[in-house]
Amino acid sequence: MSVSHDHAHGHRHDDGHRHPFQPDIEDRPFEYYQVMAEAVGELLIDKGVLSAAELRRAIEDLDSRNPALGARVVARAWVDPAFKARLLDDVNAAAGELGIDAGSIPIRAVENTARLHHVICCTLCSCYPRLLLGVPPDWYKSRAYRSRVVREPRAVLAEFGTHLPADVEVRVHDSTADLRYIVLPMRPTGSEALAEAQLAALVTRDCMIGTALPRLPDAPRQE
Amino acid sequence: MPDAFAIGQRVRVRVAWPPGHVRTPHYLRGRRGLVESIAGRFANPEELAYGRDGLPKRALYRVRFRQQELWPDYAGAAADTAVVDIYEHWLEAEDS
Amino acid sequence: MRRHHDMGGEPAGPVDRADHEHAPWEKRVDALLRLLADRKRRIMTVDELRRGIEALGPGAYDEMSYYQRWMASIGENLLEKGVITVDELGRKMAEVEARWRAAGWSGSGRPPGGVDA
């Protein structure tokens, strides 16, 4: 193997290498494109196009991206109006202030208000602010979501349990080009006493896509 | 090169059906919208897709459409909108 | 006139919100594209990736999984550009398949759907 994968399980090959699959994954038979992925990676390493270390780091970087990064940005915007202004101006730079490298593809934040609700999609493929939210959920890439959310956004939002009054404008953003979008949801009423980290916990991935709204956890019982 | 369209200007998405890699969704062809903002200038994806440099860069507009104009049977509110990023060469000026 | 991937507004059923954990090979495909497209290499663009996916056509586009589509397109692009050759990819894939089988993993290195890919 060109790339080492550390896991508890792993048969030894004749040549002493471990094979790269994990116990839960190897229950499934391998298939053509999986073989191609392995082979192409090995060829590119053999040719010096990329190194095994670069490939490993890229996978680790991919693993490190998740909605918690976006949630930190949103929570900071809720507690710091000046940061929020900078976020609405330049998401990549604002995320950088929090130590988050959001990459070079420009990300725009669209702000929900009492009269305007944003929802993000990509009807042509799967454009998504991956460096800030991680890989998109399967449904975001699905035929159903891509087909329907631009035409019947309220019906799709309702399937997610998000019901918006008729006097709230629903604005769908179809990410077709060189920009990515993140929704800046409204801070829930009743969250005034929460600290920034507690606020971040309210901000789910779907809140930042626009299919859900942040909700307060059940109020703690009085002792 | 100055941008061809200004913020607030009414525009129409060109009707054309070329083969190849196109980033203007089919449902917008011929539809009228309003330039909401100008996102900057970017290499042309129609050229990048074939291994070329995509230069000169094209202005990219965020164009807002009324949902009821896009879908005659639109079931949501009259105020609902869609905002889509469209490259300059897919837009033309819409009179009044 | 509408191309298959350009599906905004088409009729479709309810959104299935079930998600799956990405397998290691899917992450590998994602990482390969990121590296091939990065500023150090600039071997292929995301636009070329998309063009290759769109060229799969309606049948394959729907039958293949997301990262299968990515891998098919990455492979085609690398062959077109001469970064790898058909012969070396074929040999390497056979080698990988044999190695995995020897390790006790079952599966198939044949293109899905039978005679052609």
Image (cartoon, rainbow, N blue to C red):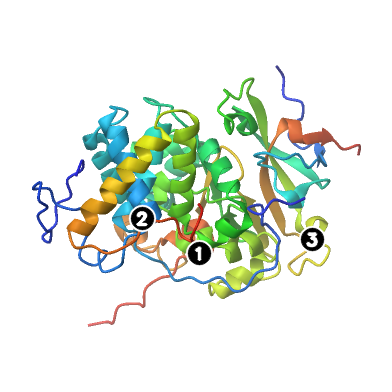
Secondary structure under tag 2 reads: loop
Q: Give x and y (percent) for residue A156.
A: 61, 69
Residue receiving disc 1: A139
Amino acid, disc 3: Trp
Res B21 visible: yes
Q: Residue A179: give x, y in percent of width and height.
A: 55, 40
Residue A105 visible somewhere in the drawing: no
Closest to the camera, between mark 3 and mark 2, is 2
Q: Nearer the viewer, residue A158 or A185?
A: A158
Residue shown at 39%/55% (left/top)?
Answer: A32
Residue denoted by label 2: C109
Q: Disc number at residue B77?
A: none
Q: Amino acid at mark 2?
A: Gly
The local secondary structure at tag 1 comes to: helix
The reply to whether dot 3 and dot 1 touch (C-beta < 8 Å) is no
Q: Nearer the viewer, residue A175 or C73?
A: C73
Q: State the mark number for residue B71.
A: 3
Residue sitting at x 40%, y 52%: A33
